[in-house]
Image (spheres, grey):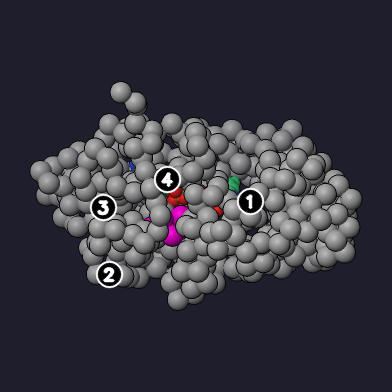
Amino acid sequence: MSALATEVCVIGGGLAGASTALHLARRSVPVVLLEKGLAGAQASGVNFGGVRQNGRHLAEVPLAMRSRREIWDNLPALIGVDGEFTVTGHLRLARTEADARVLETFSAEAAKLGLATDMVRGQALRERWPWLSGVPVAGCFCPNDGHANPRLVAPAFARAARAACAEVREGEEASAIERDGAGFRVATRSGLELKARVLVNAAGAWGAGLAARFGEPVTMHTIAPQMIVTEPAPHRVAPVLGIVGGAIYLRQIARGNVIFGGGDGIADTATTRHHVVPDATIDAAAVAHELIPHLRHLMIIRVWTGIEGETDDLIPVIGASRTTPGLFHAFGFSGHGFQLGPMAGKILAELILDGATPSPIAPFAIGRFAPRS
Ligand SMILES: Cc1cc2nc3c(=O)[nH]c(=O)nc-3n(C[C@H](O)[C@H](O)[C@H](O)COP(=O)(O)OP(=O)(O)OC[C@H]3O[C@@H](n4cnc5c(N)ncnc54)[C@H](O)[C@@H]3O)c2cc1C
């Protein structure tokens, strides 16, 4: 069978890969996206839905701010749906004075990068958000953060890429990948063969394995953040909540259900199976009840988890390969890729087509994991 020829082959149909394909296709570049299952069905489609700049690693703040402006403010024009994106603000809470200092440091450092947040202390927290218990001692509020529905947003990126003339092939697992002259030859398990000048590794929790094939080790492990949703209740909790240390994160959607995450389940990238650990659900619920007492009365109606790649330094890999011309990476989002992943796709399109990006991506270079000689 003769190989299908294209300019760019993207491996992975999550937000990072689908957004790369979308931004390339919008610039009239022939692109084929290979997704082993359904586009947007892994982490991108099952996550918490937090769209936050607040509390990000400082290296991610410029990216998160650009993502907020260019992706999230622009969602219907970009992907044809609003994805239930709602601007509610994000409130990150501290339960101890030491944690309050973490918030203050973030707020001061983020301000230098242009991100405005308010520090709110003590009783002022309860006056502004009366449903909070007396446990939090301080909060850092970022007013233009919010949340969206990943089940709508993730597949919509792949649909939009397809509408922009990217060829999105679902059920195609890239299994053999090799250099071929100045480009790449990719074969899938079902027998599809593809030649491309450029290869994009947007394989999520499987991305480190793919990078290793090109002599680029990345210290990344698999995590399975646990999610919980309650029955609907009158809408009271407006901002998305986080907490220093990450014990829980919580949002209430317009329909009234309270969605929160906390703890880790078990995931296996070989089988793509993942499941919740009931004790972690109980622990997360206890923290949620401690912060917002009225939640005690709500029944949990569903729990789930997903497969995510977490790097050792908790920030993603974004940028050109160090070993292989024409290869680009965007993976290992470490729990932050719902907000950042679509922006990473736009950045890869800039790198591929313009050879540069206005975003400061040096901290995300894959070379940081190279063994020191
Ligand atoms: C439960 C949970 C909660 C989270 N909450 C948040 C949050 O609130 N806010 C936030 O910003 N982030 C959050 N995240 C993180 C976010 O969901 C991820 O960082 C992001 O979706 C990663 O996108 P991706 O495209 O890199 O990976 P994925 O969505 O995993 O996509 C990678 C795709 O590559 C495919 N693939 C892999 N190997 C191959 C191959 N060989 N051939 C073809 N296809 C292949 C996979 O099938 C998969 O579909 C959360 C994650 C989880 C799991």
In front: 341, or 302? 341
Magenta segment includes 344: yes
**Marks 3/2: CA distance?**
15 Å
Q: Is residue 348 above or below residue 86?
A: above
Q: Which span of residues is magenta-colored?
A: 341-345
Q: Residues within 10 Å of mark 1 (few under 14, many from 20)?
A: some
Q: In the rendered structure, which disc, 2 or 4, sits on the residue that comes first in sequence?
A: 2
Q: Residues within 10 Å of mark 4 (few under 14, many from 20)?
A: some
Q: Residue at x 34, y 49 (%)?
A: 319
Dot 2 alpha-carbon crowd within 10 angstroms: few under 14, some 14 to 19, many 20 or more: few
What whole-number distance in Å separates the C-alpha atoms at marks 1 and 3? 39 Å
Given contact means CB atoms under 8 Å apart, are the residues at marks 3 and 2 in contact?
no
Mark 4 to mark 1: distance in Å? 18 Å
For the residue labelled by badge 2, is the local secondary structure a helix, a strand or a loop? loop
Instruction: Give how far across and how far down residue 315 sits, in percent.
Output: 49, 43
- Asked if the residues shown at circle 1 and circle 2 are in contact, with their CB atoms under 8 angstroms apart, the answer is no
- Which residue is under mark 1? 106
Name the residue that disc number 4 marks: 363
Residue 27's label in the rendered image is: 2
In front: label 1 or label 2 = 1
Q: Callout 1, which amino acid?
A: Phe
**Residue at left offset 72%, top offset 45%:** 101
Q: Earlier in the sequence, mark 4 or mark 1?
A: 1
Where's residue 343, x and y in %?
43, 60
Question: Quick check: can you spot residue 53?
Answer: no
Secondary structure of the residue carrying numbered label 1: helix
Q: CA distance from mark 2 to mark 4?
A: 27 Å
Q: Seen from this angle, which residue lies furthest bottom?
A: 77
Location of residue 7 in the rendering, given as x and y in whole percent from the top left corner: 19, 57
